[in-house]
Amino acid sequence: MRLRIVVLVVFIVFLAILVKVLYIQLWRYDFLHEQARESWNRQLPQSAGRGLILDRNHSVLVTNRLKPSLYVMPGQLTDVEELVDELHRLSQVPKEVILKEMTRKSSLNELKKTPKALTEDQLIELQAKGVPGLYTTVLFRGRIPMGRCWLRLWDLLALMDRD
């Protein structure tokens, strides 16, 4: 008698799980699929300022500069041609170059040539449009005011000074 009760309880639990799975897969699929698409995880690269590198006379050798960046998630784009046209209009970068950068086989593509041609106001305008799949961010990049040649010379002098 006890064995029949245990088997009946296990059968009812299994049946309840099966009904729940069928309910989710058949009747709630569209809703849950849309919810998952909207909450897609976006991990955009961020970088912090590194500070200044000074020489012994407190002259700046290396500073930071802000670099605007555009990222595209191809899976979230709804109208690629319209976005390419808009970016071409704002940046004057050829459409073929923009399209090639946007459609690389990756979950997150950085547009490298386009942001260089955009002003800060244009980036804000793009962000305000709320285009699905297009994200803007600002990264810090090192900037060498006197040029790389001077930096190499300072490195060489520092090595010679150690001896």
Image (spheres, helix red, strand yellow):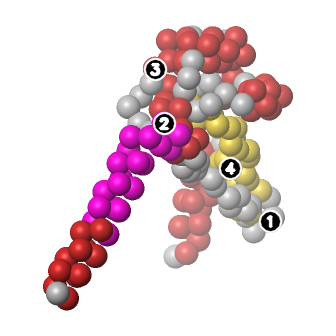
Foreground disc of the pair 1, 3: 3
Rounded to the nearest angstrom, the CA distance separating label 1 from label 3 is: 47 Å
In the visual, does 51 lie left or right of 105? Answer: right
Given contact means CB atoms under 8 Å apart, are the residues at marks 2 and 4 in contact? no
Residue sitting at x 23%, y 81%: 5
Helix, strand or loop at mark 4: strand
Across and down, in percent, residue 30 comes to: 48, 36
Cα–Cα span, label 3 and label 4? 25 Å
Residue at the (31%, 57%) spot, across then down: 18
Q: Nearer the viewer, mark 2 or mark 4?
A: 2
Q: CA distance from mark 1 to mark 2?
A: 66 Å
Q: Quadrant of residue 106?
A: top left
Mark 3 or 2: the one toward you: 2
Which label was assigned to residue 140? 4
Amino acid at pointer 1: Asn
Q: Earlier along the polypeptide chain: callout 1 or callout 3?
A: 1
Which secondary structure is most common in the magenta stretch? helix
Looking at the rendering, which quadrant does residue 134 occupy? top right
Front residue of this view, candidates 102 and 12: 12
For disc 2, the marked residue is 30
Q: Which mark is residue 100?
A: 3
| Label 4 with label 1: CB-CB less than 8 Å | no
On screen, residue 10 versus residue 157, left or right, reads left
Q: Nearer the viewer, residue 146 or 135?
A: 135
Residue position marked by numbered label 1 in the rendering: 57
Mark 2 surroundings: few (<14), some (14-19) or many (≥20) residues within 10 A: few
